[in-house]
Amino acid sequence: MDTATPALRLGRHPAFVRFWLSRVGSALAFQMTGVAVGWLIYDLTGSALALGLVGLAQFLPMLALTLVVGHVADTFNRKRVVAVCQAIAALTLALVATGLLTGTIGVAGIYAAVAVIGATRAFEHPTLSALLPSLVPGEALPRALALSTSALEIATIAGPAVGGLVYGLGREVPFAAAALCYALAASAMASIAFTPAPRRTGPVTLAFLLSGLTFIRRHPVVLGSISLDLFAVLLGGVTALLPIFARDILHVGSTGLGVLRAAPALGALLMSLTLAHVPLSRRVGLKMFVAVMVFGLATVVFTVSQNFYLSFVALFVLGVADTVSVVIRSSLVQLSTPDEMRGRVSAVNSLFIGTSNQLGEFESGVTAALLGAVGAGLAGGIGTLLVALLWMRLFPELRHMDGFPRRPEPAQQ
């Protein structure tokens, strides 16, 4: 009898292992870039609004490309799409590092590079999400999602910490390191031995492009899950304001900023590894709502804290709660969606995630410019709590969801 744990059995799938390594490299590069860009922009401008514009620069390409992304992910070889996106990101960051080293790039150039990275992630993230269910058995998907989340959290722990540390060696160093990580991620993705299922070859119609939105609207559990994450994180995210808290409130500098950026990822990593070995199976809807409310409370605690260690703990708890919500939401969405539509649904889901994260950073920057960082954080945390309570009433099907659905059979061509 095979006594290996489910997580270890997933490690016997070479395609999943390469997928996991690619995701680690890509996420590590993105997180290093995030902390470096945030510190650089705030150092150059001293403006909370300028920090918020970083999120907007990432979000606008995602908004513009959503319908195209879904079509690409459901038509072309998904691993190749991901590898090309990662290679473009590597080249972009290499150019940024060169520009900083030679003094030929300014704030506008940094925003342009961020927009390119946003465009590559617009394709990469939903395509990765659509690819994963094809690499593992259906019953192993929740565990695979938990391990995939652990890849993100490992990177989110290491990326900001390394980015903050090496920033002191030179402004160009974290960008060069991130370019290398993206290049290695592209290599790992390209090496996956995977034969995709036959894809749709008919004409591309508006109804086809919009079918992801139509599917989500017709499935209350999927709609409730995605929109809950959208509004909760849109209101409650404080990531964009961390440079302000690190420098002006907690007085811990760029190294402390890296540690604060890593704190939620540390909590998320521990929780994702726990869920990979002891997956959620009962009352998943209610658990997701509770996790979102804990996320909001942790945001409030972080905002009012003036002690570095309490702030770290609050962000750690925030990461734990966010991971529970993410794993449940991702499992519900992926297991409810047929494979032939997964790219379009994932593209819309990624737009919602981008709205909550990148547009949320813009919203936080604007709110902080008006109310101050503390006022913006308090408003966001309280808003998250109110959204969770309201969504429990608006989506009773989601609240009463006991277990995960079975993966639907592919549609007959």
Image: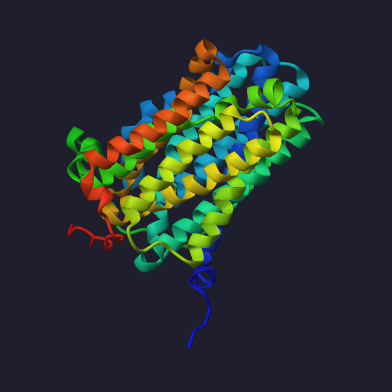
Q: Is there any visible trace of residue 395 in the rendered image?
A: yes
Q: Is residue 346 left or right of residue 255?
A: left
Q: Residue at x 42, y 41 (%)?
A: 293
Q: Position of residue 288 (x, y in %)?
A: 37, 49
* Residue 222, placed above or below residue 39: below
Q: Is there any visible trace of residue 19 in the rendered image?
A: no
* Colour approach in the figure: rainbow
Q: Residue at x 73, y 22 (%)?
A: 100
* Residue 134, placed above or below residue 297: below
Q: Position of residue 348 (x, y in %)?
A: 32, 38
Q: How many marks?
A: 0
Q: Quadrant of the C terminus?
A: bottom left
Q: Is residue 358 left or right of residue 92?
A: left
Foreground of the two, 410 or 332: 332
Foreground of the two, 379 or 68: 379
Foreground of the two, 83 or 55: 55
Q: Position of residue 340 (x, y in %)?
A: 27, 52
Q: Position of residue 21 (x, y in %)?
A: 58, 55
